[in-house]
Amino acid sequence: MAFAPLGEFFPEVADRETRSVTVPAGLDLPIPPGDYAFMEMYCNERRCDCRRVLLYVIRRGRDGPQAVITWGWEDVGFYQNWLKHGTRSDTIRMKGPALNPGSAFTKLAPYLLEFVRDVLLTDSDYVERIKRHYRMVRQKVDQPRLLPRSRRPIKPRKRKPKKRP
Ligand SMILES: [Zn+2]
C-alpha cells in the first residue's frame, strides 16, 4: 500500500488541521527549538481499509522527515489480519505508535515518538481528527468520481458517433 499526504486530497483541510508545535528556545529539552509539523499520510489504495496514519514529522527549514511514526487506532487483532504471516511483534509495531520500519529517521526520532505517544495521541480531539481525516480520504479514494478530474484513474473513453441531421 502507498501513503499520500492529506494535502493531496484536501489541501485546505491539511492547511487548517495539521498539528504543529513550536519548541521555544531556552528550554532544556531533547528536541531542539523550532517549528515541527506532524504531516498526516494516508493509504491511497482503493478498497483498502487499513486504519492507520503515518505521521511525517517535519522540522521547518530542514529537508526530509525527522521521524515517520506509524499509528493504528484499532486493536492488535485487527492488524493481525493484515499481517497474516507477521509475528505478533510485527503486528504490535504496525499498530504503533512506533517508528515506521524502513523509513528514514534522525536522532530526534525517539523523542518525537514519545511526544506523539504521550501528548498528541492522549488528546481525544486529535485522535478523532485523525479518524475523520482517514474516513474523508477513504471516501475519496474509493469513489474516484469525487476526485478532481486530474487525479482520477484513466479510463478508456468510448467515442460516440457524431449525429448528423
Ligand atoms: Zn491501506
Image (cartoon, rainbow, N blue to C red):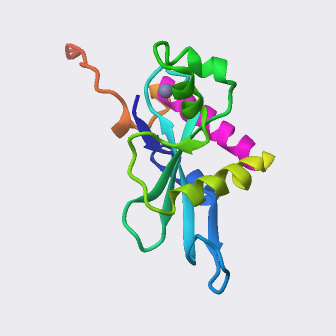
Residue at (55% x, 75% y) in the render: 32
118 on left or right of 112 = right
Q: Position of residue 145 (x, y in %)?
A: 46, 27
Q: Establish if 138 lies above or below 78.
A: below
Q: Is residue 6 visible?
A: yes
Q: Does residue 104 show up magenta in the picture?
A: no
Q: Position of residue 52 (x, y in %)?
A: 57, 33
Q: Quadrant of the C terminus?
A: top left
Q: Is residue 12 visible?
A: no
Q: Does residue 129 show up magenta in the picture?
A: yes
Q: Establish if 65 lies above or below 5.
A: below
14 on left or right of 28 = left
Residue at (48% x, 54% y) in the render: 67
120 on left or right of 47 = right
Q: Residue furthest bottom?
A: 26
Q: Main secondary structure of the magenta part?
A: helix
Most foreground residue, 134 or 109 = 109
Q: Establish if 68 lies above or below 24.
A: above
Q: Quadrant of the N terminus?
A: top left
Q: Position of residue 106 (x, y in %)?
A: 43, 60
Residue at (55% x, 34% y) in the render: 93
Most foreground residue, 164 or 110 = 110
97 on left or right of 59 = right
Q: Which residues are magenta?
A: 126-142
